[in-house]
Image: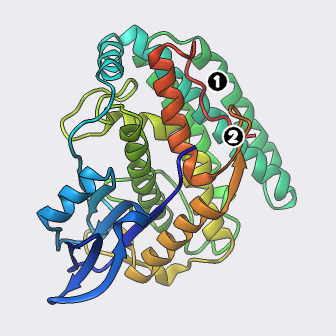
């Protein structure tokens, strides 16, 4: 089993990252603020414009350490990728499947099966834990509708129709998402899912969480030898990590959405943690983003689950790596079908 190491989140916007022996140094105004051993890291995510030295980028690529750059708002900018060391036969099979829409759909529908199942589980959890605080009939209707859509997805053989079912399921799920927010409704509400840019506090948190999850999925896929840019549900687009977006579909409800809901419902964020620009887009403050990243990393390392397919206890942070491994095993022919992550 892969060892789960740390992710270094660099929040200082003007920080420059450089390699000092076997350490990554955080440099601000020519002064080294902190150093971290590369041996303890599996990912580095920088939220700023300072950049990084070529030596550090090369060291990260050589050691298979993910190095990503995002805007201070959390919007993904770029990711450093080194020499491809994956099994060439595995990637050739990935490309053959991706070029065949019918075969792509057979894999893609498992991502959507996982997504809809886990969305229903999020709804069911809120029903179970907060029955007296919600409209139970509304929640049950949403869960029943998702179950009906799921039955169609299981039989779907066309990618375009599969995307239609996925869109219908997302609309149903987000129709009750606001009801899963149980406190501080003046500051936290979701009338509609919007992304580019996020226009309220909840959408800002969801978009940031999805950015983090996308990076984790891309790193997981590359680590098992797959090309994170060639997907089955999301088709090829220059600069888009389509397979990472595929993989994160089934993981959104429990890894990202539930995490955001927990922060809100526990009162760990408030309205002062967000700023709105003149154009209307909303983003977290620097301090809020630091607390968000700290909580995200702690959950990845400290919280464990019993993986529903492997029946092994693993940290939450290893779920993308396990799913990437299972996808690679399917493409190699070791598994008849890709087993999606179905949270119980």
Please tell me which residue is depicted at 43% across the width and 66% down the height of the picture.
40
| Of labels 2 and 1, the one closer to you | 2
x and y percentages locating residue 44 in the rendered image: 34, 63
Please tell me which residue is depicted at 39% across the width and 64% down the height of the picture.
39
Residue in the foreground of this view, choosing between 146 and 241: 241
Q: Is residue 91 left or right of residue 313?
A: left
Most extreme residue toward the right is 132
Are there few (<14), some (14-19), or many (20+) residues within 10 Å of tag 2?
Answer: some
x and y percentages locating residue 257 in the rendered image: 57, 53
Instruction: State the SS at label 2.
Output: loop
Residue 237 in view in this figure: yes
Which quadrant of the structure image shows residue 225? top left
Residue receiving disc 2: 307
Residue receiving disc 1: 150
x and y percentages locating residue 148 in the rendered image: 69, 23
Residue 10 in view in this figure: no
Which quadrant of the structure image shows residue 131? bottom right
Q: Which mark is residue 322?
A: none
């Amino acid at each position: 089993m892969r060892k789960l190491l740390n992710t270094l989140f660099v929040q200082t916007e003007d920080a420059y990252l450089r390699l000092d022996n076997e350490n990554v140094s955080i440099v601000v105004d020519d002064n080294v603020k902190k150093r971290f051993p590369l041996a303890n890291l599996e990912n580095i995510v920088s939220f700023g414009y300072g950049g990084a030295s070529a030596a550090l980028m090369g060291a990260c690529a050589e050691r298979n350490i993910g190095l990503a750059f995002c805007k201070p708002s959390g919007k993904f900018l770029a990711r450093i990728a080194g020499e491809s060391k994956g099994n060439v036969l595995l990637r050739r099979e990935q490309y053959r499947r991706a070029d065949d829409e019918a075969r792509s759909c057979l894999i893609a529908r498992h991502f959507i099966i996982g997504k809809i199942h886990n969305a229903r589980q999020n709804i069911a959890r809120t029903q179970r834990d907060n029955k007296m605080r919600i409209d139970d009939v509304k929640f049950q209707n949403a869960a029943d509708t998702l179950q009906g859509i799921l039955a169609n997805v299981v039989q779907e053989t066309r990618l375009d129709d599969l995307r239609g079912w996925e869109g219908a399921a997302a609309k149903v799920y987000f129709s009750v998402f606001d009801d899963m927010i149980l406190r501080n409704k003046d500051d936290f509400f979701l009338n509609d899912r919007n992304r580019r840019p996020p226009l309220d506090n909840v959408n800002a948190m969801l978009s940031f969480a999805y950015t983090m999850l996308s990076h984790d999925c891309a790193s997981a896929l590359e680590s098992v030898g797959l090309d994170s840019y060639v997907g089955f549900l999301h088709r090829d687009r220059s600069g888009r990590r389509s397979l990472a977006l595929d993989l994160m579909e089934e993981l959104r409800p429990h890894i990202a959405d539930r995490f955001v809901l927990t922060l809100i419902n526990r009162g760990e964020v408030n309205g002062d943690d967000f700023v709105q620009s003149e154009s209307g887009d909303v983003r977290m403050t620097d301090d809020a983003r630091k607390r968000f990243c700290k909580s995200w990393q702690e959950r990845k390392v400290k919280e464990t689950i019993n993986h529903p397919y492997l029946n092994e206890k693993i940290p939450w942070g290893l779920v993308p790596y396990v799913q990437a491994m299972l996808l690679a095993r399917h493409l190699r022919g070791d598994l008849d079908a890709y087993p999606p992550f179905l949270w119980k």
